[in-house]
Image (tube, rainbow, N blue to C red):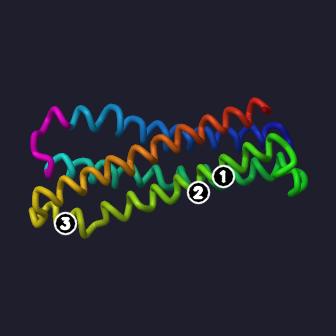
Amino acid sequence: MMAIEQAVITWIHLVASAIWVGGSLFIAMVFAPVLKTMSSSVEDRLQIMIKVGRRFNKIAVPSLVILIATGIFNAHQMLIRPDFLFSTSYGMLLVIKIILVVGLLVAFGVHVRIIRKEVEQKITAKQLSDSQIARLRTKIIIVGEVTVVLSVAILFMAALLDAGL
């Protein structure tokens, strides 16, 4: 492959990563704390957060798909033979990164399942008790934090792979 083609694929991978990880960090570390100061109602905050999450997913999910596709392509370029996956340090780091990506996909799937449209409608219609809202909020926070931590860990693995360790 020509150097310019590899550079473009790497650039696309980095842009998609910036959207996914940067957006996730922004929501977790900037938007959620600011939202907490703007409304005392947990129901209102959940409704707003779900709407923001749905809007973010319109760019985040395609970015995640692009990340996976370009990641597979890049890995294929680096691993000439399949046995290199378990016989080289690059391959072993890649295996760890793949495991983290699978964990991320599971966590993101759980997150989407928790805040499905039906749940959003129940919140809007005020059909959930305070304890149900509290449990829902706790689940969303935990799974969201797991998603962000896994995303940052995957970035670290990418840095290790890029460094040639």
Q: Kindly give the residue lying farthest to the bottom in the view shown.
A: 118
In this view, 121 is above or below 26: below
Between residue 71 and residue 108, name the one nearer to us: 108
The percent coordinates of residue 95 (x first, y second) are 72, 50
For the point 10% across and 45% down, the residue is 41
Mark 3 vs 1, N-terminal side: 1
User: The C terminus appears in which quarter of the rendering?
Assistant: top right
Q: Which mark is residue 98?
A: 1
Q: Which mark is residue 68?
A: none
* Residue that carries the numbered disc 2 in the rendered image: 102
Region of the chain picked out in magenta, as a range: 36-43
Q: Kindly give the residue lying farthest to the top in the view shown.
A: 163
- Tell me how far mark 3 sits from mark 1, CA to CA: 35 Å
The answer to whether 43 appears left or right of 63 in the picture is: left
* Residue that carries the numbered disc 3 in the rendered image: 121
The percent coordinates of residue 55 (x first, y second) are 34, 51
Q: Quadrant of residue 32?
A: top left
Q: Which class describes the residues within 10 Å of circle 1: few (<14), some (14-19), or many (20+)?
A: some
The answer to whether 26 appears left or right of 135 in the picture is: right
The residue tagged with tag 3: helix, strand or loop? helix
Q: Which class describes the residues within 10 Å of circle 3: few (<14), some (14-19), or many (20+)?
A: some
Q: Amino acid at mark 1?
A: Ile
Q: Amino acid at mark 2?
A: Val
For the point 87% across and 48% down, the residue is 87
The answer to whether 8 appears left or right of 151 in the picture is: right
